[in-house]
């Protein structure tokens, strides 16, 4: 497959076996467009992530994917998503205001 998913060419071709899960990292996802790849993996996990703070929420690919915070994260919503990490890091992430619209995150 030579289609582009979230700007990453050939992502699905790297999934060797349809019984393996696949993860797609990004700040937004077109679930309608990604649905065509559901047969290429056992499950497709969408992961909200930023280079500055890493992964902070995940959802399984479906028509209405609802993101939930990862266990090491506290996610708040204002106009954009605000992330804090509870894990011990060399550089703590405390109330990092992202540019990701709050409407992207459906979790509590």
Image (spheres, grey):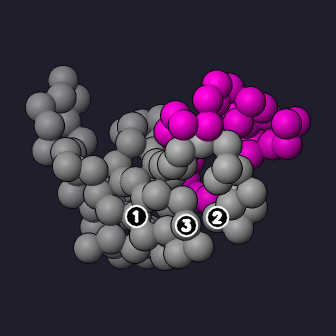
**Which circle's residue, 2 or 3, is located before the other in the chain?**
2
The magenta segment is: 1-29
Q: Are marks 1 and 3 in contact (CB under 8 Å)?
A: no
Label 1 packing within 10 angstroms: few (<14), some (14-19), many (20+):
many
Mark 2 lies on residue = 31
Rendered image quadrant of residue 102: bottom left
Q: Nearer the viewer, residue 66 or 86?
A: 66
Q: Is residue 96 visible?
A: no
Taking the view exactly as shown, the residue that stands out farthest to the right is 2
Q: Quadrant of the C terminus?
A: bottom left
Q: Is residue 46 left or right of residue 108?
A: right
Q: Could you tell me if residue 65 is visible in this image?
A: yes
- Check the image and report above or below for 3 versus 104: above
Q: Name the residue at 18% across, 29% down.
A: 89
Q: Which residue is at 59% across, 42% downward? A: 41
Dot 2: few (<14), some (14–19), or many (≥20) neighbours within 10 Å?
Answer: some
């Amino acid at each position: 497959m030579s289609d582009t998913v979230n700007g990453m060419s050939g992502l699905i071709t790297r999934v060797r076996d349809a019984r393996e899960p696949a993860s797609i990292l990004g700040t937004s996802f077109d679930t309608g467009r990604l649905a065509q790849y559901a047969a290429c993996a056992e499950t497709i996990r969408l992961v909200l992530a930023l280079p500055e703070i890493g992964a902070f929420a995940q959802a399984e690919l479906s028509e209405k994917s609802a993101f939930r915070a990862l266990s090491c994260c506290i996610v708040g919503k204002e106009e954009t998503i605000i992330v804090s990490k509870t894990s011990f890091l060399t550089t703590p992430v405390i109330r990092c205001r992202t540019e990701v619209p709050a409407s992207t995150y459906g979790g509590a």
